[in-house]
Image (cartoon, grey):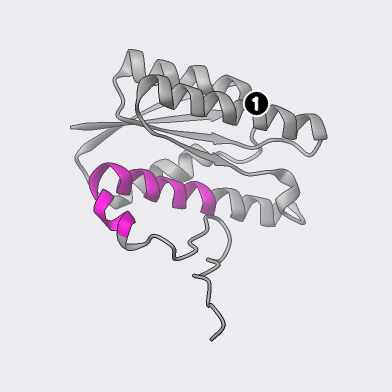
Amino acid sequence: MKRIGVADTTFARVDMARAAIRSLQAQGTGFKIVRRTVPGIKDLPVACRRLFQEDGVDLCLALGMPGRAEYDRTCAHEASLALLFTGVLEAKPIVECFVFETEAKDDGELDRLARRRAEEHAGNAYTMLFRPESLTRRAGTGLRQGFPDAGPVRPRA
């Protein structure tokens, strides 16, 4: 049985983990979900490392929502680098799902974006564990999480 770690924060303004977990459960069976919630986005790398080392997860989904301040963008960048480093140290994937408050024009749009992106990243996590070959078929198709897909490049003739 596979184990999927879900790490999220209290700083986020939307419970992205709940949306991600619902999405994972709708994908199928054959896995157990282990959730760790931490205060802020810079705490996510340690949460993921603990999920790998203490809980034996096969993949982590790291969910965060940086605030609007420039400092928050810097913290998100640092957290992202640390998540990459953690994944390399553990030789296991971490699917990072950050939603920046500045991506939405109001709270309603932010709520929809955060839930949709968390659900779509959860679907990617499930696919990485159980159907990785299907990712190859989708290479170069311009898929996006949270917003409409961009589609592939259409070269001019």
For the residue labelled by badge 1, is the local secondary structure a helix, a strand or a loop? Answer: helix
Image coordinates for residue 66, horizontal then vertical, percent: 69, 35
The one nearer the camera, 149 or 51, is: 149
* Observer able to see residue 40: no
The one nearer the camera, 92 or 118, is: 92
Q: Amino acid at mark 1?
A: Glu
The one nearer the camera, 4 or 153, is: 153
Specify the farthest residue to the bottom: 157
Residue plotted at (56% across, 56% down): 146
Residue plotted at (58% across, 19% down): 43
Q: Could you classify mark 1 by the number of other residues whose Cα lies within 10 Å: few (under 14), some (14-19), or many (20 or more)?
A: some
* Magenta stretch contains residue 106: no
Specify the farthest residue to the top: 54
Vertical position of residue 69 compared to residue 157: above or below: above
Vertical position of residue 69 compared to residue 145: above or below: above
**The residue stretch that appears in magenta:** 116-136
* Magenta stretch contains residue 122: yes
Q: Which residue is mark 1?
A: 78
Vertical position of residue 94 compared to residue 118: above or below: above
Residue plotted at (19% across, 40% down): 30
